[in-house]
Structure formats: C-alpha cells, structure tokens
C-alpha cells in the first residue's frame, strides 16, 4: 500500500523542524570486490555501511527556535544532531548526523528556502 508523503516530518529529538517540504535518506554499503583471476563474472561482499540525508523547505529561522535555528546553530558549531525522518506518524529512520551543508536560496518573487545536508555518523535505524 502506498503512503502519502504529506504525513512525513523531520524532528530533532522530540521537536519537529518547521516548514520542511521534502526529505531524503540514502543508506548504503561499500561493495568490496572479491573477483579472482580467471573468473568470468565479478563477485562482491558488503563492507562498511553508511548513510546521508537531506531536507529542504521554507526558511523560518526566527520562528522555529527548536528546529531550524537548532540546525543552523549545530551547523555553525560543527556539532552533531539526533535526527528522526518520519515516513508517517509511526514509521521513521533515526540516527546521529553532522550537517555538512546548509544552502539558503533567496529568489526574487519566491519564498526563501533552506536545505540541510546530513552526514550520518554511526548506525541508521528504522522504527
């Protein structure tokens, strides 16, 4: 059964980050090649796991002190955040991450937007 994206959100601890319109998580495994001389087909084993994520939405720093302001403060200080990426009200990915980029875009005639790019440190879990 498909799930409506409208029920997703991003939280820091228990505080929802305001005005996020989209998020994405990218878990991955390094693939280590084990192909030997004389083999006709490549073979692999999985190596280390890692993950990254991103979120973007409208810029509302002054009115979201426990969300966007906390993300900006963590980014500028180089500290990690406890992140939860909700697919719906009960299912979410969670982990600790550093904010690697925080571009802000101010186009004339449109709303100011902010993006956050996260680099996971440690395990990503799904609840």
Image (spheres, helix red, strand yellow):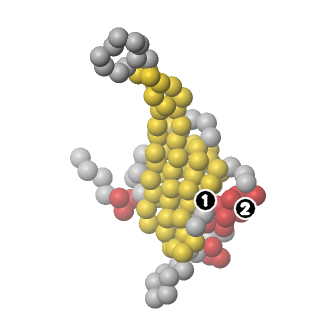
Residue 25 in picture, x, y percent from top left: 46, 48
Q: Is 109 placed left or right of 122 in the picture?
A: left
Dot 1 crowding, Cα within 10 Å, few <14, some 14–19, many 20+ = few
Q: Which mark is residue 55?
A: none
The residue identified by callout 2 is: 76
Residue 79, image x, y percentages: 72, 52
**Element assignment for label 1:** strand
Label 2 to label 1, Cα distance in Å? Answer: 10 Å
Labels 2 & 1 near each other (Cβ < 8 A): no
Quick one: label 2, few (<14), some, or many (20+) residues within 10 Å? few
* Most distant residue in the left direction: 1
- Say whether disc 2 or disc 1 marks the residue closer to the N-terminus: 2
At x 52%, y 32%, the residue is 49
Q: Residue furthest front?
A: 38
Judge whether residue 40 can be spotted in this image: yes
User: Where is residue 84 drawn, in percent x and y?
Assistant: 53, 50
Residue found at x 62% / y 44% = 96
Q: Is residue 89 visible?
A: no
Which one is in front, 17 or 26? 26
Residue at numbered disc 1:
101
Residue in the foreground of this view, choosing between 108 and 19? 108
Q: Secondary structure at mark 2?
A: helix
């Amino acid at each position: 059964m498909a799930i409506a994206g409208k029920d997703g959100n991003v939280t820091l601890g228990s505080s929802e980050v305001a005005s996020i319109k989209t998020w994405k998580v990218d878990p991955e495994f390094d693939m280590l090649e084990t192909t030997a001389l004389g083999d006709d087909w490549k073979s692999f084993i999985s190596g280390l796991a890692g993950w990254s994520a991103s979120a973007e939405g409208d810029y509302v720093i002054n009115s979201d002190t426990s969300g966007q302001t906390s993300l900006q403060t963590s980014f500028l200080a180089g500290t990690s955040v406890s992140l939860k990426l909700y697919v719906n009200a009960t299912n979410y990915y969670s982990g600790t991450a550093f904010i690697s980029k925080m571009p802000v875009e101010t186009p004339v005639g449109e709303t100011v937007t902010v993006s956050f790019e996260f680099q996971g440190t440690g395990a990503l879990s799904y609840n």
